[in-house]
Image: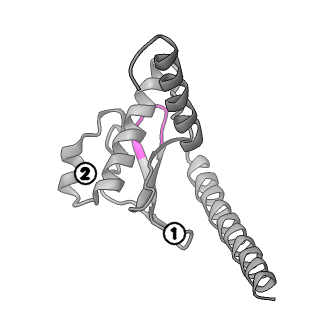
Amino acid sequence: MNMILLIILFLVAFALQYLLTFIQMRSFNEHYRNLRKQGRVAIGKSKGAIRAGAIAMFAINSEGIILEGSYLQGVTVFARFHTLKGFEGMDVGKLTAEDCKQLHLAKPLSKAVIEASSNYNILMSGKEIPEEPAPLTKVANLFRRRSAHTLKGGKQ
């Protein structure tokens, strides 16, 4: 009987997590659409597994000047988007850590802002933004490297 209750609780928790993630993604899409109406959008993210992560988005004009910004910062799916003030009129491709420091931004949000700037510069130079591998891919690659090293006669 206890096992059935545990399974039901697990399924309810899973469904709730899915629902809250869906709501957060709708919020992201809504904010993206609103920024997109003003022009192009530069996006940066800072992942946080246990600590807070952040997403920064900037509506920019054709010259790369920031018109408006939004950010999401938090650990859970309860985090919501807020207006990111202080960058209006600045060139997104020239944002620095000092700019973030002057606005007293938290470290994850500062990383997301700098990544948005970097992503913009990469795309404007005609290159593609490299995707970071997913956590499971990282683990699989670690095992592949270790087995390749072992097969070559290295110590384990």
Q: Nearer the viewer, residue 137 or 24?
A: 137
Residue type of the residue flagged with mark 2? Cys
Q: Is residue 96 left or right of residue 77?
A: left
Q: Which mark is residue 76?
A: 1
Q: Is residue 5 visible?
A: yes
Among the two numbered marks 2 and 1 on one chain, the one whose residue lies closer to the N terminus = 1
Q: Are marks 2 and 1 in contact (CB under 8 Å)?
A: no
Q: Nearer the viewer, residue 48 or 107?
A: 48
* Residue 43 located within the stretch drawn in magenta: no
Under circle 1, the secondary element is: loop
- Residue 48, compared with residue 134, is above or below; it is below
* Relative image position of residue 77 (x, y in whole percent): 56, 69
Q: Nearer the viewer, residue 23 or 87?
A: 23
Q: Is residue 133 left or right of residue 14?
A: left
Residue plotted at (60% across, 56% down): 34
Frontmost of labels 2 and 1 is 1
Image quadrant in which you'd find residue 9: bottom right
Q: Is residue 30 left or right of residue 2?
A: left
Residue type of the residue flagged with mark 1? Thr
* Residue 63 located within the stretch drawn in magenta: yes
Quadrant placement of the N terminus: bottom right
Q: Is residue 63 visible?
A: no
Numbered range of the magenta stretch: 60-66
- Residue 147, compared with residue 38, is above or below; it is above
* Residue at the spot of label 2: 100
Image quadrant in which you'd find residue 91: top left
Mark 2 closeness class: few <14, some 14–19, many ≥20 residues within 10 Å: some
- Residue 80, compared with residue 123, is above or below; it is below
What colour scheme has been applied to the protein in the rendered image?
A: one colour
Residue plotted at (25% across, 51% down): 100
Residue plotted at (34% across, 47% down): 111
Quadrant placement of the C terminus: top left
